[in-house]
């Protein structure tokens, strides 16, 4: 099939590449000329395991193309995906300007019947807006071209995006068009060979499914973080409680790790957007509002532990930090807890030395740009020398089992603040460390 993907970020680039991998002819479009130039030179603008190899392979096979010119891409396409960002607007709701700008461009450029698929995470009712916007442009052109609008929310996880896309748990398709359903079934068939993963529903339910899924996962995280904070006060160990409750199949082990709060490009903005959607429709989403409030507070729990240990004024103290990205396997720092912790410590006069395997450029160029008193290190052990404590904020594999002797020798004092509860089985206290974790005194 000939496919166009509009928006070549995490979702667009991964989806386009995986569709190309299955033998489709895919053109990825983006308005960012620098991004497209890089992609055309074989430079992948994001870090995602396995992506580079797959992109280069499919470009070589003439299955995958990159351009800024939409009409050229649409000329032979039968399906076009909208995969642009839907960032948080000023009032917290999803900003639809990019999605609707793309819909307008599609209406202006399409030359044959198209299935228009919304893969961006969008508020309920957006498909109607996309349809109206495209139709308006076709009316201006006096064109009677047909098109169908489909909602196909994306559930990939950054860091495991290729695997998630190639073997999805489910493919949710919202549409009332049999023509579009057939096209989508053909497109996704190669990804669902072992069992049927295709779930068809109406458009609004598909749009809502994405928000409900993210809100549920965020709720699990905030629930466990709240339990962890209670554990700490009552003298329980949140990690043992996690194992105790996770063993119940109805609860399960995933997404109940106490930690420094969720970040990333999806949960924070989608949880916020869902509360806005609910409010717009007169619903009082008490639970989802609380999920967000718990998370906002959780991002600063580690900083508070540091303040309790070292004092309100951190002038003269240096903290070595491991981890910047919001989770391992990605260079994405959107809403990462590290941003909040580092800014809080620096605002109290502390100096920071930080190492992350992939996200240092992101920090320097965007998320910590202009923040003073930060030194970026080339290796994890480089941050230790002259640091008063080590603070762990992202659970990269290379941090899982460090050389604790080296930590002891290099740090000014053997103190660890573990924002990811990674070291609770290492009996660090017996090794002479002062060890602080989430959900344990
Ligand atoms: N990142 C994830 O893990 C993830 C997972 C599931 C769903 N989503 C959703 O998918 C959508 C995209 O997310 P992302 O993380 O890929 O965003 P992103 O910011 O990484 O990429 C968006 C891309 O769209 C481009 N763009 C903007 N306007 C354009 C236009 N008019 N024409 C062409 N390109 C344009 C931007 O230049 C950018 O490259 C969002 O709605 C997000 O919520 C993201």
Image (cartoon, rainbow, N blue to C red):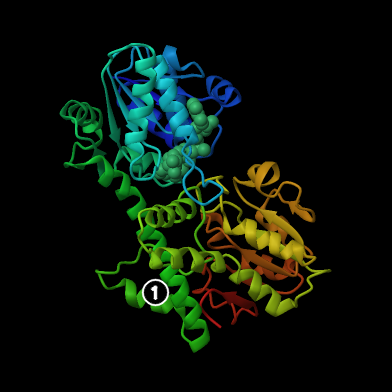
Residue 216 point in image, percent of width and height: 35, 60
331, above or below 39, in the image:
below
- Where, quadrant-wise, is the C terminus in this rendering? bottom right
Specify few, some or many for label 1: CA neighbours under 10 Å numbering under 14, 14-19, or 20 or more.
Answer: some
Q: Which of the 4 image quadrants contains residue 436?
A: bottom right
Q: Nearer the viewer, residue 196 or 418?
A: 196
Rendering coords of residue 212 (x, y %): 33, 54
Q: Is residue 317 above or below residue 186?
A: below
Residue beneath the point at 46% across and 85% down: 236
Q: Determine the image quadrant of residue 307.
A: bottom right
**Could you tell me how many numbered marks the image carries?**
1
Q: Nearer the viewer, residue 361 or 413?
A: 361
Q: Secondary structure at mark 1?
A: helix
Residue 287: x percent and y percent? 39, 67
In the image, taking residue 4 as reference, residue 204 lies left or right, namely left
Figure check: 243 above or below 322:
below
Which residue occupies the extreme bottom position in the image? 234
Would residue 49 be seen by someone viewing this image from the given angle? no
Residue 228 point in image, percent of width and height: 47, 76
**Residue situated furthest right in the rendering:** 316
Q: The N terminus lies in which quarter of the figure? A: top left
Q: Nearer the viewer, residue 241 or 93?
A: 93
Q: Is residue 15 visible?
A: yes
The image shows residue 410, relative to residue 413, as above or below, that is above
According to the picture, the residue beneath numbered tag 1 turns out to be 242
Does ligand 1 reach within 8 Å of label 1's beta carbon? no
18 left or right, relative to 269: left
């Amino acid at each position: 099939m000939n496919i166009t993907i509009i928006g070549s970020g995490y979702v667009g680039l991964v989806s386009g590449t995986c569709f190309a991998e299955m033998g489709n002819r895919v053109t990825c479009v983006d308005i960012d000329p620098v991004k497209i130039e890089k992609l055309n030179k074989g430079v992948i603008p994001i870090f995602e395991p396995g992506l580079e190899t797959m992109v280069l392979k499919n470009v070589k096979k003439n299955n995958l193309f990159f351009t800024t010119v939409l009409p050229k891409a649409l000329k032979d396409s039968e399906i076009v995906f909208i995969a642009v960002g839907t960032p948080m607007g000023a009032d917290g709701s999803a900003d639809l300007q990019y999605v609707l700008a793309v819909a307008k461009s599609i209406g202006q450029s399409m030359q044959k019947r198209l299935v228009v698929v919304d893969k961006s995470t969008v508020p309920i009712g957006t498909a109607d807006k996309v349809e109206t916007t495209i139709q308006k442009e076709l009316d201006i052109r006096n064109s009677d071209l047909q098109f169908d609008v489909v909602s196909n929310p994306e559930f990939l996880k950054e860091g495991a995006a290729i695997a998630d896309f190639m073997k999805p748990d489910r493919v949710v398709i919202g549409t009332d068009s049999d023509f579009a359903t057939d096209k989508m079934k053909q497109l996704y068939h190669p990804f669902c060979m072992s069992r049927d993963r295709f779930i068809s529903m109406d458009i609004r339910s598909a749009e809502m499914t994405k928000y409900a899924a993210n809100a549920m996962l965020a709720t699990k995280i905030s629930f466990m973080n709240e339990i962890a904070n209670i554990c700490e006060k009552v003298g329980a160990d949140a990690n043992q409680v996690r194992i105790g409750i996770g063993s119940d199949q109805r609860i399960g082990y995933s997404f109940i790790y106490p930690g420094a709060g969720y970040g990333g490009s999806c949960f924070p903005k989608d949880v916020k957007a869902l509360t806005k959607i609910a409010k717009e429709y007169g619903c009082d989403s008490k639970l989802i509002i609380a999920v967000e409030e718990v998370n906002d507070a959780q991002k600063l729990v580690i900083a508070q532990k540091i303040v309790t240990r070292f004092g309100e004024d951190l002038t003269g103290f240096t903290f070595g930090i491991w981890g910047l990205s919001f989770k391992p396997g990605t260079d994405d720092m959107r809403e990462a807890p590290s941003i909040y912790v580092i800014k809080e410590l620096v605002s109290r006069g502390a100096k920071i030395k930080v190492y992350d395997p992939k996200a240092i450029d992101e920090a320097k160029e965007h998320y910590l740009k202009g923040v003073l008193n930060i030194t970026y290190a080339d290796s994890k052990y480089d941050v230790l020398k002259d640091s008063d404590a080590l603070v762990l904020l992202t659970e990269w594999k290379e941090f899982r089992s460090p050389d604790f002797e080296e930590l002891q020798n290099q740090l000014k004092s053997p103190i660890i603040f573990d924002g990811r509860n990674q070291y609770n089985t290492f009996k660090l206290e017996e090794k002479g460390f002062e060890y602080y974790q989430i959900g344990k005194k």
